[in-house]
Image (cartoon, rainbow, N blue to C red):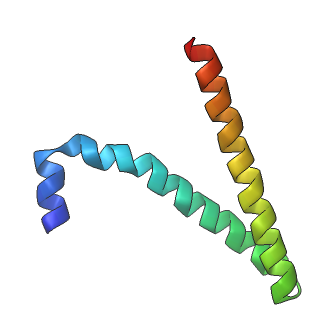
Amino acid sequence: QDVAKRIQKDPTSFWDLAGGLWKVVDYVCDMGEKALESDSVEDGFKKCVEVLKDKLEEEMDEAELQEKTKL
């Protein structure tokens, strides 16, 4: 209820967070998918780390591109 009241008072705060939250959910789903494809816990963990590493590299590439195009 408290969150709903804050969103009504300042709706932009929710939308500022929504993009980041969506990315986290997407990352977790992708990592879970890769973990389910693996045969062992160790292999699943390695695949999760690989997915996270790839996602973070994509984020860095996008951030660098935005920074370059901003100038």
Comparing 51 with 39, the one in front is: 51
With 6 as the anchor, is 32 left or right in this view? right
Comparing 27 with 68, the one in front is: 68
Mark count: 0
Comparing 35 with 64, the one in front is: 64
Residue drawn at (77%, 79%) of the image: 36
Q: Position of residue 57 (x, y in %)?
A: 74, 46
Q: Position of residue 19 (x, y in %)?
A: 45, 47
Direction bottom: furthest residue: 40
Quadrant of the image for the N terminus? bottom left
Residue drawn at (55%, 15%) of the image: 70
Residue drawn at (33%, 44%) of the image: 15
Q: Position of residue 49 (x, y in %)?
A: 77, 67
Residue drawn at (77%, 77%) of the image: 35
Quadrant of the image for the C terminus? top right
Direction top: furthest residue: 71
With 52 as the anchor, is 47 left or right in this view? right
With 43 as the anchor, is 19 left or right in this view? left
Where residue 24 sits, quadrant-wise, is bottom right
Where residue 11 sits, quadrant-wise, is top left
| 39, above or below 19, in the image | below
Q: Position of residue 58 (x, y in %)?
A: 71, 43
